Amino acid sequence: MDYARSFAHSDSLMDFIKKPTVVLRAATTFIMMLIFSCVLDKGYSSKGVCYYNGKQGACNYTVGISVIAFFMGIGLLAVTFFWDQISNSIVRKYIVFADMSFCGLWTFLFFVDFCFITDMWRKTPAKLIMATMVKSNLQFTIVCALVSVFLLALQAYLAYKQLNDMQNDASGIGGYSDPAADITGGYGGSPFPPHTESAGGNYQSPYAS
């Protein structure tokens, strides 16, 4: 899977939606919505007590990180769609680095969340008498938290690969030609060796046969 190709602006919305990395990010964003929706809908009692063993932090933490990840996912999808309109290669590198850093950090946060709410659910004495819908939502949230760990880790890895490609590519944009680079011969000067003259004044091209 080529992470760079997800940033290529397509002529149609359908072409954009069909890209594997766009599908991956959209699926992750959707799961984030499911997580905070399940907790907000069925995770609290009528008195506002968290059903995860009465630990308010379990519900609040889960909702907090999933809401942030949801809006971040929407933002990155928008940036992906308009990627070709960002001509500055430095800005592009910052975006990919931010993507990699965010996904890496949130992978860790969701791993902590998965362990936390799983332990709280194991210790919840009232789960045997809970309504079926409440129990299903809380268990589904645990599963989604685990799935999110793998999805975010994969996105962090793909962003890391793209950042490496951008560092190694002369144009600095990871395989896509930059119009400014095409005109000037690339950033950082000409790729051809400098012309030199011998002591006799006769120039010999380094590419002459």
Image: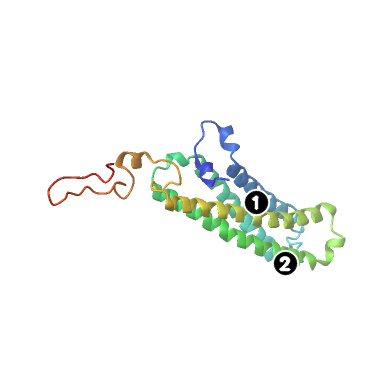
Q: Residue at x 77, y 59 (%)?
A: 45
SS under mark 2: loop
Q: Which mark is residue 32?
A: 1
Q: Residue at x 51, y 45 (%)?
A: 4
SS under mark 1: helix
The amino acid sitting under disc 1 is Met
Who is closer to the viewer here, 57 or 12? 12
Residue 19, compared with residue 50, is above or below; it is: above
Residue 91 screen position, x and y as percent = 41, 49
- Give the farthest residue toward the front: 209
Residue 198 screen position, x and y as percent = 16, 50
Residue 78 screen position, x and y as percent = 52, 42
> Between marks 2 and 1, how big is the CA–CA gap?
21 Å
Q: Which mark is residue 74?
A: none
Q: Are marks 2 and 1 in contact (CB under 8 Å)?
A: no
The amino acid sitting under disc 2 is Lys
- Quadrant in which the N terminus appears: top right
Residue 205, compared with residue 55, is above or below; it is: above
| Disc nearer the start of the sequence (2/1) | 1
Splitting the image into 4 quarters, where does residue 140 fall? bottom right
Q: Nearer the viewer, mark 2 or mark 1?
A: 1
Does residue 54 appear in the picture of this structure?
A: no
Q: Residue at x 67, y 62 (%)?
A: 113
**Which residue is labeled 2 in the image?**
55
Who is closer to the viewer here, 195 or 207? 207
